[in-house]
Image (tube, rainbow, N blue to C red):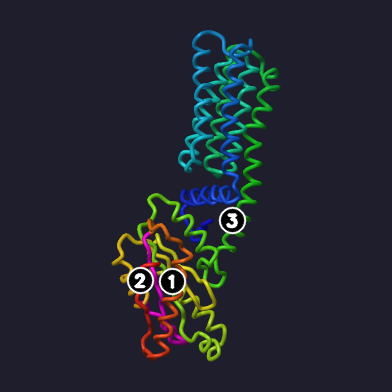
Amino acid sequence: MIIESRPVLNGRRYGVSYRFLTTALETTRNTARLKIAIGVLCISMTVLAVIAQFNPLGPQGLWPRVVHGIAAGSALLVGVAWIVRPWPSRPWAIAFVFWADTATAVGASMCSQPASQLGATNHLALIGIFAAFLLGWRVLAAHCLFATAVITALTLGNLHAGAATLSELYIYNAPAYSNVVFLPIVIQAVIEGMRKSIYRNAIAAHHDPLTGLLNRRGVQSAMRARLRGEPPPAIVAVFVIDIDRFKEVNDTYGHDVGDSTLKYVADTLAGGIRNRDFAARIGGDEFMIVAFLDRSEDVDTVRARICDSSLNTAEATVSISVGSAWQYTHDEDFTFESLSREADFSLYEAKRTRKNQRVPRSCTCYPSYPGA
């Protein structure tokens, strides 16, 4: 599960939240169950609509029956799509809410009696729960406004036609308002609090508390999410960075300076990468950068940029050693774990080179090579 912790715009924040929830569903293997449940509910709307065609309170006349039947048929198609198709992206999920609201409103308005019209609008509550759980306040607010307009329009239409009095309609539209509008809002308020708590816990589980970078678990989750993307990256390059003689910094200047040094190195490394790449702290004084590249020649460019980073603080001069490895993602034996081991070995060689040759530079780099 990849978690974004940096501030984002509202629209993007909702997109991040949707990815977070759907990834959580995938991780717990509940996506398939939820897809089938939604699909079955859609198909059940078709069954109920067919029964309503033969009910005295259902649609009467040719055109109401035809329009009602088209709405019912679309529910069958959408239900099958939910079952057989992959989990939808957020735009498609919003489109589903738009279709479901429209089809339910059209189907309800085609019924011949106030009781059946207002009773059918209660199905809008199911759509509101879907929006509340997955899509956030904005989509839910739009849904609730639409549902309120539909219930109000049906109520006023029946009053104008003299089909019922306001007191008679109250028996039907009061439950409709409470089920369709107020219930999803209450559910959303509860879910939002739970979601924020879960989100904070997930961020804490995937990030290093001192530097704010991803931790080792976060790197693994981010890699899984990135490799599932379309199109997948051509090359993955792993750079493992170690602060030389960091224990001496702690012993000489104290742990506060040591922590400040770690934060400074983390900020420097994170500030020097592209948005598509990510940085992590994977050990006490060990960091990792994972870069997604199109050409093997770019590996040396990224490594040089890391080595050229200015790492001198006010308290201490920081030197680093860098090990790296890269591999094409289409290779049959490609795994992130094996690539990380190759980068660790490369770092070991870089540290040994510095120790044996006493290289007086701010960065020792061992040449990278394709992963085995």
Relative to 104, is 335 on the left or the right? left
Image quadrant containing the C terminus: bottom left
Q: Secondary structure at mark 1?
A: helix
Please report the bounds of the magenta region as a residue range: 309-328
Q: Position of residue 138 (x, y in %)?
A: 52, 42
Q: CA distance from mark 1 to mark 3?
A: 33 Å
Viewer can see residue 168: yes
Marks 2 and 3, the one that precedes in the sequence? 3
Kindly identify which residue carries mark 1.
Answer: 342
> Which quadrant would residue 186 be assigned to in this image?
top right
Along the viewing direction, whichever of 3 and 295 lies nearer the viewer: 295
Query: How far apart are the two marked residues, 2 and 3, measured between alpha carbons?
Result: 38 Å
For this rendering, which residue is in front, 127 or 248? 248
Q: Is residue 233 above or below residue 79?
A: below
Q: Is residue 236 above or below residue 167?
A: below
Q: Can you name the residue that lies furthest to the top here?
A: 61
Label 2: which secondary element = strand
Numbered mark located on residue 269 in the image: none
Q: Position of residue 284 (x, y in %)?
A: 54, 77
Residue bearing the label numbered 2? 369
Amino acid type, residue under disc 3 in the picture: Tyr
Looking at the picture, which amino acid does disc 1 mark?
Glu
Q: What's the mark number on residue 199? A: 3
Q: Earlier in the sequence, mark 1 or mark 3?
A: 3
The image quarter in which residue 104 lies: top right
